[in-house]
């Protein structure tokens, strides 16, 4: 491919270093040319040809950058994304899209006004566990789904000194992990009729929420989204990653996708074993008989591969903008429900 979109990455912390840089590098239609970060030594070690900028505004001013990727602390997402759109860049925003639904809707309107593409990095749509569950549901193996339960749990009993846990705007487990859970649920079932939620800080000394239990109410099913920093993941003896029950049976997936762990360990798309998930799903029929099915290979690299094709050839975005806004709506409705201790009906007013 002769034409490649030049990408500028804003932020080189956990998200930028572990997820965005490697996955951008795996996309044949994208070229990472600039990073806004103080970690210049680390960037040079990764690729000495990449230009480092001291801040977001300096990178946004680079006329060569066509696509800006915002991987900064959550509270800064909306302003940086808006600045990049006004500067004529296409934009990817790491989750959460914004702090409020109003900010998300304003960004969507700004993208339309500037004629630039805007999307959110919901990479967990390409996880092995979710891809496996989605395929089983689409095949109708368990019939009409009445109960869908999705857990994103981590065992981190000690509060750490970092912005994600300090109680500042955009911190907490619901802003961190909630967007993943919501996006997957909406990709399967669409917008719910209403949301009810209980969100709390349960660890000793926790300034930000570290436990969330949210129910999406549909006419004929309930979807439970749960996130905790005080519980092991399913493959570590905790709750299953997915437990789905339908009119013909059930499907259970215990273990989580391994792509994050692989990226941290230095594995990259295309390497042997990339995206492999050794934990099978268990499919139960109406008589309780179980069939084990291998998990689908995870493919988070598809987010940026699909984005490059969208920018070059007009293909659909990997995450349509209206779906990203819908995730923000549910995220906010859950916060309202937990605060007011009541069920919140959707849609939320503009």
Image: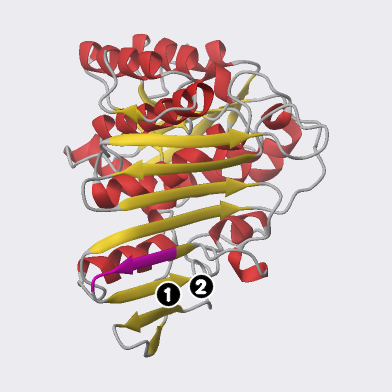
Residue at horizontal 53 percent and vertical 73 percent from the top: 273
Position of 92 with respect to 166 (left or right) is: left
Dot 2: element: loop
Packing grade of label 2 (10 A; few <14, some 14-19, many >=20) is: many
Image location of residue 219, percent across then percent down:
21, 46
Packing grade of label 1 (10 A; few <14, some 14-19, many >=20) is: many
Is residue 39 visible in this depiction of the protein? no
User: Which colour scheme appears in the figure?
Assistant: secondary structure
Residue with the mark numbered 2 = 277
Residue 183, numbered label? none
Q: Quadrant of residue 102?
A: top left
Q: Quadrant of residue 44?
A: top right
Furthest toward the left, the residue is: 314
Tell me: residue 228, above or below residue 237.
above
Residue at horizontal 48 percent and vertical 36 percent from the top: 197
Furthest toward the front, the residue is: 342
Q: Out of 21 and 236, give the one closest to the viewer.
A: 236
Residue with the mark numbered 1 = 295
Marks 2 and 1, Cα distance to the nearest angstrom? Answer: 6 Å
Residue at horizontal 66 percent and vertical 70 percent from the top: 237
Position of 251 with respect to 145 (left or right) is: right
């Amino acid at each position: 491919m002769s034409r490649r979109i030049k990408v500028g990455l804003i932020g080189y912390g956990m998200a930028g270093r572990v997820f965005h840089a490697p996955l951008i590098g795996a996309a044949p239609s994208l070229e990472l040319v600039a990073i806004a970060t103080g970690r210049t030594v680390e960037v040079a070690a990764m690729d000495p040809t990449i230009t480092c900028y001291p801040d977001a505004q300096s990178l946004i001013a680079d006329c060569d950058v066509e696509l800006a990727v915002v991987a900064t602390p959550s509270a800064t997402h909306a302003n940086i994304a808006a600045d990049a759109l006004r500067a004529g860049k296409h934009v990817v925003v790491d989750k959460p899209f914004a702090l409020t639904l109003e900010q998300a809707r304003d960004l969507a309107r700004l993208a339309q006004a500037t004629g630039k593409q805007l999307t959110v990095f919901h990479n967990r749509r390409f996880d092995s566990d979710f891809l496996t569950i989605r395929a089983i549901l689409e095949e109708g193996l368990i019939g009409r789904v009445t109960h869908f339960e999705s857990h994103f749990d981590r065992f981190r009993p000690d509060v750490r000194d970092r912005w994600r846990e300090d109680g500042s705007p955009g911190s907490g487990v619901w802003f961190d992990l909630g967007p993943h859970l919501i996006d997957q649920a909406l990709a399967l079932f669409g917008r719910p009729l209403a949301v009810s939620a209980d969100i709390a800080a349960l660890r000793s000394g926790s300034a930000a929420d570290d436990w969330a239990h949210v129910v999406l109410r549909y006419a004929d099913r309930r979807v439970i989204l749960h996130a905790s920093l005080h519980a092991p993941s399913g493959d570590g003896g905790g709750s299953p990653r997915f437990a789905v029950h339908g009119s013909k049976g059930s499907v259970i997936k215990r273990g989580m996708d391994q792509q994050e762990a692989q990226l941290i360990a230095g594995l990259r798309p295309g390497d042997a074993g990339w995206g492999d998930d050794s934990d099978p799903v268990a499919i139960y029929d109406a008589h309780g008989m179980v069939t084990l099915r291998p998990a689908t290979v995870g493919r988070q690299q598809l987010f940026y591969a699909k984005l490059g094709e969208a920018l070059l050839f007009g293909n659909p975005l990997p995450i349509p903008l209206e779906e990203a806004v819908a995730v923000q709506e549910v995220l906010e409705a859950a916060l309202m429900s937990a605060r007011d201790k009541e069920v919140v009906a959707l849609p939320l007013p503009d």
